[in-house]
Amino acid sequence: MRSLLAELERIEPRSYFGRVAAVQGLMIEIGGISWRLSVGARVGLGARDGREVEAEIVGFRDEVALAMPFGPLDGVGVGCKATVKSDQPTVSPDRSWLGRVVNALGEPIDGGPPLIRGPRSCFLRGRPPQAHLRDRVGPPMDTGVRSLNTFLTTCRGQRMGIFAGSGVGKSVLLSMLAKFTETDVAIIGLIGERGREVKEFIEDYLGPEGLARSIVVVATSDEPALMRRQAAHMTLTLAEFFRDEGQEVLCMMDSVTRFAMAQREIGLSAGEPPASKGYTPSVFAELPQLLERAGPGTKGSAITGLFTVLVEGGDTDEPVADAVRGILDGHVVLDRSIAERGRYPAINILKSISRTMPGCQTKEQRAISGRARELLAAYDEMGELIRIGAYKKGSDPRIDEAIAHNAQLEAFLSQDMDEHETLAGGFERLAGILGHERAAA
């Protein structure tokens, strides 16, 4: 009943409509009602075959509004009716959505029953809490992945980026985090994913246990740019809903790069000039507006954000990766050369950083992880000489110690996708590798 009453309150007392003036590619020009529309408003386009195609206003030119569709434009032509739907799109989530798979419009796509609409409407393009009112990040969070727990300890409410090229293991690492991380709710956004991989991720990687406490938002690569962009905002909106309900939320998105590509496509169609590598200025304006929505709330609960970034050719300094790295609270770099030698997750510890460290670790934990990092750095420094046999044992005691511990450290950093390691267990195992006298130092 509450849901029905809320729906009745959202009904507009009158409707406004104009006409399609032109269609150029995916851009629709709407005349007659530009005075009633604003950027972000929704319109329904009446196709000649009786369908209604939903579209969003992305700009204005002279006296016409520019819109892009959420679906195919078949049957839409000059003179078709364009009805104003809403100025600020909203969604009404409910706790019963857990365990479901939805699209960017909040519609179920898993073959299950219709979703229950909650009594509270949430804006799709929500605003983050004011900076001076936000809580600080919370205590360390057990992710279940020992390399992250020990070397890149993550706190509740922190936002981390996972930077990698294609096929290096981002999706598998995300599935491990979704299953093992201690949290109340997980919201997973698959943005621009290959269609065949969605079911594989849900059934094989996430599994029934992970899905039961999750909502998966999907926009595949073949869907229009607006759907891909909105899927990212839908992911954060659902995370904000559960955060405001007092839940600890883990929000994961794969990937921010495809969100940026969708915004680039929209910006270029609207007439924006290309800036860096073809990305338009609006891309770099949209990224912080999206990513800042994750993080601590104002009432004790938080959204811990994990966002993957698909780097082109392994270049972590390309424009999107560089912009995202400056916004987030740390970055995890997945290295193709590590994956090629069979160590998963292929995390390059020396190139990764968590900005809440070392403050989130105890003195003993800092000594353990710091010493292990020193040994990894020493081995990496002399790696080429060691592999070709040019290094002579006894030349440098520091390098000798790094060589002695390298095999055990590599085994420690390797973890099967079904293997779970607690935060305390990871430090205990790492201390055992280094020797107890080192751990206590």
Image (cartoon, grey):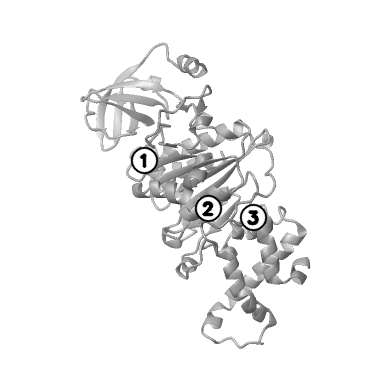
Q: Position of residue 71 (x, y in %)?
A: 31, 34
* Quarter of the rendering occupied by the C terminus: bottom right
Residue under the image location 44 percent in, 23 percent down? 87
Cα gap from disc 1 to disc 3, whole angstroms:
40 Å
Q: Residues within 10 Å of mark 2 (few under 14, many from 20)?
A: many
**Residue closest to the far top:** 13
Q: Quadrant of residue 15?
A: top left
| Left or right placement of residue 201 versus residue 79 in this view | right
Q: Quadrant of residue 433?
A: bottom right
Q: Count the marks: how many?
A: 3
Task: Give the structural element (helix, strand or loop) at label 1.
Answer: helix
| Left or right placement of residue 437 versus residue 17 in this view | right
- Label whose residue precedes the other's in the sequence (2 or 3): 2
Instruction: Name which residue type carries label 2.
Output: Met
User: Which mark is drawn over residue 422?
Assistant: 3
Q: Position of residue 7 (x, y in %)?
A: 46, 18
Q: Which residue is mark 2?
A: 176
Residue under the image location 58 percent in, 63 percent down? 349
- Is residue 326 at all visible to an observer of this figure? yes
Q: Position of residue 410 (x, y in %)?
A: 57, 70
Cβ atoms at labels 2 and 3 below 8 Å apart: no
- Label whose residue precedes the other's in the sequence (1 or 3): 1
Q: Which residue is mark 1?
A: 225
